[in-house]
Image (cartoon, rainbow, N blue to C red):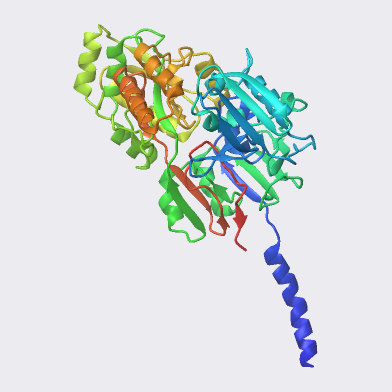
Amino acid sequence: MLSRLCLAVALLVLPLSAMAQVERPLVVGMALEPPHLDPTAGAAAAIDEVLYDNVFQGLTQIAADGTVQPQLATGWEVADDGMSWTFTLREGVTFHDGKPFDASVAKFALDRFRAAGAENAQPQLFAAIDSVEAVDPTTLKITLSRPDANLPYSLGWGDAVMVHPDSADGNKQAPVGTGPFMFEDWRRGDRVILTRYDGYWGEPARVPRVEFAFVSDPGTALASLLAGDVNAYPNFPAPEQVPVLEANESFTVEIGTTEGEVILAINSARAPFDKLEVRQAISAAINRDVLIAGAMYGAGTPIGSHMPPHNPAYIDLTGVNGYDPDRARALLADAGVTNLSLTITLPPPAYARRSGELIAAQLRQVGIDVSLKPVEWAEWLSSAFKGKDYDLTIVAHTEPNDIGIYGRPDYYFHVANARLDEVLAKLGTEADPDARIGLLQEAQKLIADDAVNAFLFVLPKIGVWDARLTGFWHDSPIQANDVTHVEWKE
């Protein structure tokens, strides 16, 4: 009788035990939908947030702690003169359509990114490359026109992930990469769905399926978590709701750092913003503390130049063009600018829309008439970023170590500073860590003194997820929602 009872209990327990082992899909919430799905052909952070490391991989990887790690390359060596790098590539890697990855594919990808007229949003990553040679299937040699000590780091960006010649042209709609997840579906306006790739060369993904759901409204984001429709927000868009979630044992809340410098970009190619005094006046009219309290509910760190405080080269320049409305009025008078009217173009993120309303009020206090122009993300990219048709605009620059954009004369906020160009050029070839810090600090000062933009704050990384989940990144050293190590506890 006892043995029969034990057998009955065992039959009941086994299914329950098996259910505890069943893999669950994962639903990740994001505020913005990507305009397309090719990280090598667009500037929108949302592209990388869906695809970096999940679907696409580079020769190198920028890891959760910000360090450069091997990925499709297992190692690399630089020549003594710094003019060439040799990468040893991983064997047995296939794309999701079964095509092999080798040095000829890597050569194709790098040549494609740096070709004349390429869509790549970060051409400076490849500017020092003179030629790429597939020495043999597992050896890639990159010859430079000048030393580039930062090359392994540059090749870890989403803009440098590997693409295959047979699928590259279709990646915007149906991406094909080498990562642990493969593309399944894009339900426009709703979500992108990825499934685990069984032929992956490395450690398999720990969830069988991940859906990136696009939830633009902050209130809806909270409701979706509470209802269980979304399991996680690596970047929760409603900082005002954090206390509610911290008090709920069903959720984990982690607040980390990002590379997201939020700036009020100034179009200095358009009068009167070409005058230094006008740019200085705009910056001096802005109270960053009020901005962070009102737009971010206290979650944010003020900055005075284009560098996050966690960077070893950071210097506090918030006092340069710091809040001083009387000085702002005087600067406008000195510039001979009266009755100034301008428009602030606002992309969809809550930090931009909320900051825009507060900045408009502060600029009006110094005599500037302000109109607000909310636009969708695609329109911002086409009109403000690419078309340079704006007066002021608010956006977070989330690319890591991206101070080099201030050396691009055709960039959307139009920098023109010969000394800054010299400093950034030296930075591209300098390998000594202490010397690099000195150059980075000089660049920050030059940018602040020139009031290129009004620098606001660094975005926090507010991560919120189901307490049964582990494996999300605490910080954001690169714009990514890497879910390759995320798993359910039970």
Q: Compared to 271, does 481 lie above or below? A: below
- Residue 86: x %, y % from top left: 61, 30
- Looking at the image, residue 221 sits to the left or right of residue 108; the answer is left
- Looking at the image, residue 403 sits to the left or right of residue 489; the answer is left
* Depth order, front residue of 427/172: 427
Q: Most extreme residue toward the bottom, as rendered?
A: 1
| Residue at (45% x, 30% y) in the render | 401
* Depth order, front residue of 372/414: 414
| Residue at (67% x, 50% y) in the render | 203
- Residue 224 visible in the snapshot: no
The number of numbered discs placed on residues in the rendered structure image is 0
- Residue 35: x %, y % from top left: 62, 27
- Looking at the image, residue 13 sits to the left or right of residue 57; the answer is right
| Residue at (41% x, 33% y) in the render | 354
* Depth order, front residue of 324/372: 324
- Residue 361: x %, y % from top left: 32, 26
- Residue 474 visible in the snapshot: yes
Query: Which quadrant of the structure image shows residue 276?
Result: top left
Question: From the image, which quarter does the C terminus lie in?
Answer: bottom right
Question: From the image, which quarter does the N terminus lie in?
Answer: bottom right
* Depth order, front residue of 440/369: 440
